[in-house]
Image (cartoon, rainbow, N blue to C red):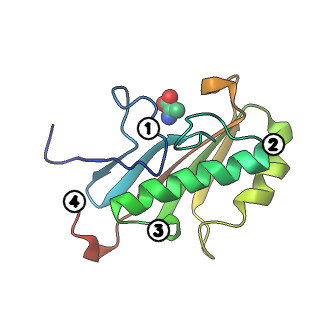
Amino acid sequence: MSSLKQKITTKDAPDALPHIFSQAIVANGFVYCSGSIAMHPETLKIVDGDVAAHTHQCISNLSAVLKAAGSSLEHVVKVNVFLASMDDFKNMNSAYENYFGEVKPSRTCVAVKTLPFQTDIEIECVAVLPPTTGKL
Ligand SMILES: CC(=[NH2+])C(=O)[O-]
């Protein structure tokens, strides 16, 4: 493994395919979080509920990964949201608007044909590391 990148792992977020991808990578002062689906960290099953409930779970998972990396939702600078249907846009936003602090990150939202586990939403983000964390 290159010393220029640090793998982040936490049991507080799903790690369903650790041999395929890392939950996050820290490099050059940034935390690159893998796409999070609404999977419960212990059951590794998609939680019950609609896209709003799934949005909350995705962001909870991202929050756990960011915490493990020494960052937080408030330090997120970019979000990509992938929906299986743009019909869910409004409902997703109703959950999403509760997170990421007052200055919202830049964001892209697109609808895609399908998502892993046939779920309805996947969210990925990039955050900055506060200077005091001592990580890469
Ligand atoms: C779920 C996910 N992030 C992936 O790449 O399959």
Q: Amino acid at mark 2?
A: Asp
Q: Amino acid at mark 1?
A: Asp
Instruction: In the rendered view, tell whether residue 126 sits above or below residue 18.
Output: below
- Judged by depth in the image, the label closer to the viewer, 2 or 4, is 2
Q: Nearer the viewer, residue 65 or 109?
A: 65
1 or 4: mark nearer the eye: 1
Q: Is residue 54 above or below residue 129?
A: above
Q: Which residue is mark 2?
A: 50
Q: Earlier in the sequence, mark 3 or mark 4?
A: 3
Q: CA distance from mark 2 to mark 1?
A: 22 Å
- Residue at 84% from the left image edge and 51% from the top image edge: 90
User: What residue is rendered at 14% in x and 40% in y?
Assistant: 2
Question: Tag 3: residue type?
Answer: His
Secondary structure of the residue carrying numbered label 3: helix
Q: Which residue in the structure is indicated by mark 1?
A: 15
Q: In screen coordinates, is 28 left or right of 125?
A: left
Earlier sequence position, callout 3 versus callout 2: 2
Image quadrant of residue 59?
A: bottom right
